């Protein structure tokens, strides 16, 4: 169901697109490629010159290589279009600092510690926010929802629908349903 039609006339001025693509590699590892673009529908004056309507202000890429434990094995960042060439794009090698992090264990905090503020690029770092769920979706179908070893499914108590005291878990994961108990708030 789409958003309702706005009641007030409006004009689109900016489009940001962020795309995550997951790849299973022949060597048993996984790549998540993230692509961000910012485009204006009008000429945009920057200190460095005018960006014409439709020309990207930002066109940036990240490729994160992970193993099946969600640990980052490799990381590369590329900036094809930035507002301040020679400045914005000079930080891309810093994203190698992601190597060794785990997407499911304090990832966002560690990203801020390693790449926050002037240690990184706001846009590249924002792209990392959706990386854990993109990786989980990339693995979907490769790993069963119920774990073969009988351990608790990772998705439980990770969102509203997967609350172990709720109806969704009661219906689809009755073994893990916790009637009367309160999940983490």
Image (cartoon, helix red, strand yellow):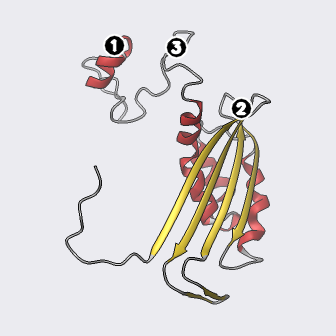
Which circle marks residue 27 in the picture? none
Q: Which residue is mark 2?
A: 67
Which of the two discs, 1 and 3, sits closer to the camera?
1
Left or right, 91 with respect to 105, comes to right
Q: Which residue is mark 1?
A: 174
Task: Choose between 47 and 158: the one closer to the eye.
Answer: 47
Find residue 180 and report its image quarter: top left
Q: CA distance from mark 3 to mark 2?
A: 20 Å
Q: Is residue 164 above or below residue 159?
A: above
Q: Are marks 1 and 2 in contact (CB under 8 Å)?
A: no
Residue at coordinates 54% horizontally, 35% vertically from top-left? 137
Residue at coordinates 25% horizontally, 78% vertically from top-left? 9
x then y, percent, for residue 158: 43, 33
Which of the two discs, 3 and 2, sits closer to the camera?
2
Q: Is residue 112 above or below residue 118?
A: above
Residue at coordinates 79% horizontally, 59% vertically from top-left? 93
Q: Secondary structure at mark 3?
A: loop
Q: Mark 1 or mark 3, which has the lower sequence index?
A: 3
Q: Which residue is mark 3?
A: 151
């Amino acid at each position: 169901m789409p958003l309702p039609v706005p009641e007030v006339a409006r004009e689109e001025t900016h489009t940001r697109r962020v795309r995550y693509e997951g790849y299973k590699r022949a060597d048993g590892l996984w790549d998540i490629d993230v692509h961000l673009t910012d485009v204006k529908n009008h000429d945009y004056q920057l200190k460095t010159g005018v960006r014409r309507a439709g020309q990207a202000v930002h066109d940036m890429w990240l490729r994160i290589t992970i193993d099946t434990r969600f640990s980052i094995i490799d990381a590369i960042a590329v900036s094809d279009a930035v507002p301040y060439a020679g400045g914005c794009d000079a930080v891309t090698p810093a994203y190698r600092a992601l190597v060794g992090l785990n997407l499911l264990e304090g990832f966002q905090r560690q990203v801020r510690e390693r790449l926050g503020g002037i240690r990184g690029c706001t846009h590249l770092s924002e792209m990392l926010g959706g990386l854990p769920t993109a990786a989980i979706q990339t693995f979907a179908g490769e790993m069963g929802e119920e774990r073969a070893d009988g351990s608790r499914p990772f998705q439980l108590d990770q969102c509203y629908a997967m609350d172990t005291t709720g109806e969704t878990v009661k219906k689809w994961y009755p073994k893990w349903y916790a009637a009367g108990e309160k999940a983490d708030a």
